[in-house]
Amino acid sequence: MNFVDLLENYLILKEKDKELYYDVKDNIDKYKNFIYDNLAYDIIIKDDFIKLEKIPGIPEDWMGINEFTEIKEYIFFILLITFLEDKNKEEQFILSSITEYIEHNYPDEKIEWTIFKNRKSLIKVMKFAIDIGIIKKNDGSEEEFSKSETGDVLYESTGLSRYIVRRFSKDIEDSESYEDLLSDEFSGISKDLGTVRKNRVFRRLLLSPVVYNDENDNGDYDYIKSKRSFIRSTFEENLGWDIHVHKNGALAVLENLNEVKDIFPNKKGESSVVLFINKEVRSKIKSGNLKKEDNDTVIIKNSEFDEFIIEVRKTHGHGFTKALRDASEEVFINMIRNFMKEFSMIREEEEFTILMPIIGKVLGEYPADYKGEGKDE
């Protein structure tokens, strides 16, 4: 068993991967101290699935469901979960019953299924629900619904939807913001602030690209710095990860980059672009064309950073994917900015972009024998 298996799956379904299910079930005991004491997570082990309750140390912009691009899709998903509460395991239902339920329960808007965008969003939600195992498709095709609102599909409930949404110890309607829910997160675990900080730090190092030493870190960086030996040995023992602690931040470093999906650098085309951006940023700092602040950040006007991104494509783009080479400047800039935000490499303000210290950690260049051919994919 690899602990990463628990991180990379919403649910480990026995029906889908029996070997992995029993591997985790038989070997989970050796990780229980890490799960309960260091992360303050819960692990649910049932006859048909295993789930690690993953909660971030702090919420970040990039967190969410990768398949979803609209707030509406999250609302559709929650309404689907609510709809499934009354469904028993193996109970069948049709897509039109879902559309009707959403129509009657969607807040502050009348959902029209004649609008293609609404149908497309619901299809995305249903496919995601199938992928994580809370429903199965028995008959029909979502593509028929894509073409017309009269298209129908037959599904069945697996009975697992009740384990997807995080359950809190108090009614969420009594909370005015997500901060209230987060403050309540540890109330049933420990009221000791030292334990709360330890759990938050371990969660951040586990799930976030970097923990910066700044005014927003709640003292987490100082805790990491003072407990670095304990933290490093714990991550090494349980995941085989190293923890690097620098002057302005701390982060987990993986020896095997293939064991986690969303990591930098990765195989996405944007990753290659950003490696060159990082290299050019570091070069301009050394030459004095960019000035570092005392906290190792660089503050640059938004327009100047956009020009910088385009210049990198002009200089190094011959090796980028065809889609990135052919994208309009606006699309290319937005793709790269979003990618860098997701990995905490930049922060955006109204007029300025802040280049964060992690940019100098990983750089890229073409191999010496590279002949300049672009990629087709």
Image (cartoon, rainbow, N blue to C red):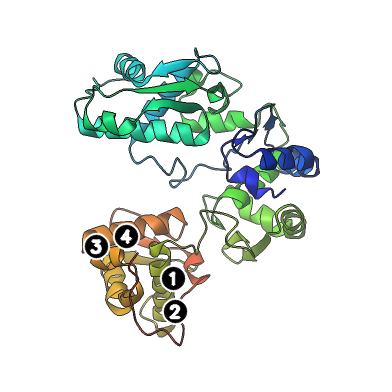
Quick check: 332 above or below 109? Answer: below
The numbered mark at residue 342 is none
**Occupied quadrant, residue 253:** bottom right
The numbered mark at residue 275 is 1
Q: Residue at x 67, y 36 (%)?
A: 41
CA separation in Å, label 3 and label 2: 22 Å
Residue 294 lies, in percent from the top left, at 49, 69
CA separation in Å, label 1 and label 3: 19 Å
- CB atoms of marks 1 and 2 within 8 Å: yes
Q: Give whichever of 264, 292 is nearer the camera.
A: 264
Q: Which tag is nearer the camera, tag 4 or tag 1?
A: 1
Residue topped by disc 3: 327
The numbered mark at residue 352 is 4
What's the residue type where badge 3 is placed? Ala
Q: Which tag is nearer the camera, tag 3 or tag 4?
A: 3
Q: Which tag is nearer the camera, tag 4 or tag 2?
A: 2
Quick check: 152 above or below 257? Answer: above
Residue 335 lies, in percent from the top left, at 32, 57
**Of the residues under marks 4 and 1, which one precedes in the sequence?**
1
CA separation in Å, label 1 and label 2: 7 Å
Quick check: 40 above or below 221? Answer: above
- Which quarter of the rendered picture does the C terminus lie within? bottom left
**Of the residues under marks 3 and 4, which one precedes in the sequence?**
3
